Image (cartoon, rainbow, N blue to C red):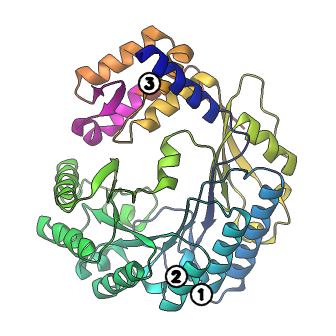
Amino acid sequence: MARATCGIYEALWLARLHHGSARSLYLHIPFCVRKCAYCDFSSWATARHDPLLGAYASALSRLTWQAHDAGLLQGLETAYIGGGTPTMLGDELAALAGGVRELAPGLKELTCEANPDSLTDRLLGRLSAAGCTRLSLGVQSLNDRELCELGRLHDAALAEERLRAAVASGMDVSCDLMCAIPEQTEMSWERSLHTALSCGVGHLSVYPLQIEEGTPFDERYGASEQPWNDSSVQAARMEAAGRVLSEAGLARYEVASYAKPGKECLHNKAYWTAVPYLGIGTGASSMLTREAYERLVSLAPQLPQAPGDISRIRLTCTTSRDAVASAKSFADLSFDLEMLSPAQAAAEDLMLGMRMVQGVGPGLLVHARTQLGSAALDEAVDWCVDRGLASWQGQRLAPTEQGWLLGNELYGRLWDLAPDEVLEA
């Protein structure tokens, strides 16, 4: 029975690896009123009334429809408009979301990221009317001293008020909170968590601050380890979040995300479960099957053909925001590429799958065994289990709490199964 079940799961997994189109869509908005001190995302400070915003949004709409007409978005299930600060676009964001809903009326989930300082009541109404089902608010903290240190534009009172307004709109609402940050204490962290919960949100993403190279935080704090950001503080804050959120009825489903039943972010889950996705916009990333990539090449003839032994292509758009805004088609865009063999893709899927509470199932494990070899896979799995990073849950291999805290070791060991170097272009 177990062997037959594995066969069914493996067939479903293999079908996923050969989708002829993207099942998820990401649109990147690279504009912010002001860059936060910790941020290294692909975004730039831009005046609210800069005409570039409208031109860029129009270009994303144009490119999305071209992808749709080429069959690249057949069966689209989730879409996510992120940034940057998408809500800077105002009514143009609602128009962009409405266009996505029009080309894919069967979407299971349509998410827009939002910042409290630019999420007006008018925009809430427009987004809901456009078919947006989910909002993700970048709150980061509900403590004024911490927000000031982070360089956020909003204060705690505005963030709380906007969270409540978003929940009242009827859309599903997620709140992002950051821990191990300057001025934060154990008490203030738990107070931020409780305040967000009191607003009625059904999803929280919690993550420790990472001091990224080249940011103002790196210049200010990067020379030495900060006591408020060391690994023990990060672990303690994440453990506290797990306790507070689980007591409130939210279950962890991904390394940094908790949700009430039925409120998980389907788009985020797609990233960790080998669902092909298309990213449009400067800095946006895509992960496509060979079959879907061939459709993209029909729109972007400047892209190279994939060699015969390649099954997965990852792309990052390197075109500037100004050039994206004036692009007439995908032929006007530039990309960095990584091309993965079936074995490399299997190792990547193992690594990414272990970000999920459910871990990896029998279908992927059987597929990985055929691609990577039984001996190599068994050795890696035993290594992870022996060190307490993973455990068997029936037929599934799942991360442990220790695996969450030592994620780099867990993910690194599984990625090490990948043979050779990834081909770049």
Q: Position of residue 281 (x, y in %)?
A: 68, 62
Q: Nearer the viewer, mark 2 or mark 3?
A: 3
Question: CB of mark 2 within 8 Å of CB of mark 1?
Answer: yes
Find numbered disc 2 in the image and state the secondary structure of the residue it sits on.
loop
Label 2 vs 3, first from the N-terminus: 2
Crowding near pointer 2: few (<14 within 10 Å), some, many (20+)?
Answer: some
Q: Residue at x 20, y 71 (%)?
A: 194
Q: CA distance from mark 2 to mark 1?
A: 7 Å
Q: Position of residue 26 (x, y in %)?
A: 61, 59
- On screen, residue 83 versus residue 396, left or right, reads right
Instruction: From the image, tell me which residue sits under label 3.
Output: 362
Q: Residue at x 25, y 35 (%)?
A: 400
- On screen, residue 62 versus residue 263, left or right, reads right
Q: Is residue 301 visible?
A: no
Q: Position of residue 78 (x, y in %)?
A: 58, 57
Q: Residue at x 22, y 58 (%)?
A: 226
Question: CB of mark 2 within 8 Å of CB of mark 3?
Answer: no
- Location of residue 410 with respect to 329 vertically, above or below: above
Is residue 410 covered in magenta?
yes
Is residue 52 covered in magenta?
no
Crowding near pointer 3: few (<14 within 10 Å), some, many (20+)?
Answer: many
Q: Position of residue 298 (x, y in %)?
A: 87, 46
Find numbered disc 3 in the image and state the secondary structure of the residue it sits on.
helix
